[in-house]
Image (tube, rainbow, N blue to C red):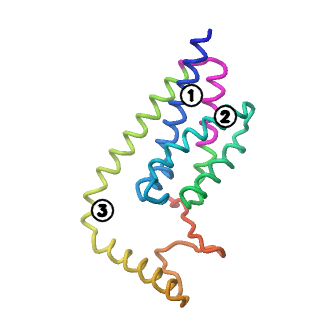
Amino acid sequence: MATSKEEARGLFRQGVQAVLDSWPVLQIAVENGFGGAYSQEKAEWMARAVEQYFESNADLEPEEMEDLLAELMNNEFNTIIEDGSLAQVSQQLCLFFRQGYQGDVAAMRDAIIQLAQKKQEARRAVAKSQPAAESSSEEEETEEEAMDCSAGSTMNGSQSNPSPLSGTTTEDGWTLVRKKKK
């Protein structure tokens, strides 16, 4: 039975990594360097921290994991998440932990495979959209100029009206990024 628990523990580690690797918010933060020069290392550390948190707190509720992830993303990547993905990621992590605790390694393996496929599909979708994004370089330049102008006016101490491209700015200076409405 000890090998079954070790196997479940190893699968839980893989599951945590798979969930975080397939979480678009974290991947965007890493790819764009929201955590600074060591964004990738912070993401890897975050996976170990989540695993350790579960090991230290066996009876976690999804809301507690949600709070931890929100705090980690804010502290390490300067990112506030309001797209609903925190709840989904937290529930998936708690499900993995319960499955590991119950020794349901088959379900864990299936879920890890599904997450890996989801990640590959997302990468393919991004790759397909790259040529279209390159052809709209004028639009991107306009957005970059708008962002540069608003950043420059803040640094010089003068306040200007935020650009419609820059999102909603809160009282404490954070820019909120919201999920697109269909």
Q: Please tell me which of labels 3 and 1 falls first in the chain.
A: 1
- Determine whether the residue tagged by mark 2 lies in a helix, strand or loop: helix
SS for tag 1? helix
Few, some or many residues within 10 Å of mark 2 (<14, 14–19, 20+): some
Q: Amino acid at mark 1?
A: Phe
- Asked if residue 39 shows in the view, the reply is yes
Q: Does label 1 or label 2 sit earlier along the sequence?
A: 1
> Of callouts 2 and 3, which one flags the residue occurring earlier in the amino acid sequence?
2
Look at the picture and state if 101 lies above or below 72: above
In the rendered structure, which segment of residues is drawn in magenta? Answer: 89-106
Residue corresponding to mark 3: 133
Q: Secondary structure at mark 3?
A: helix
Say which amino acid is labelled 2: Phe
Residue 97 belongs to magenta span: yes
Residue 84: x and y in percent read 60, 52
Q: Which is in the foreground here, disc 2 or disc 3? A: 2
Query: Which residue position is annotated with label 2?
Result: 54
State the mark number for residue 12.
Answer: 1
- Residue 126, position in %: x, y? 34, 51
Label 3 is placed on what type of residue? Answer: Ala
Disc 1 crowd, CA 10 A, few/some/many (<14, 14-19, 20+): many
Residue 82 makes an appearance in the image: no
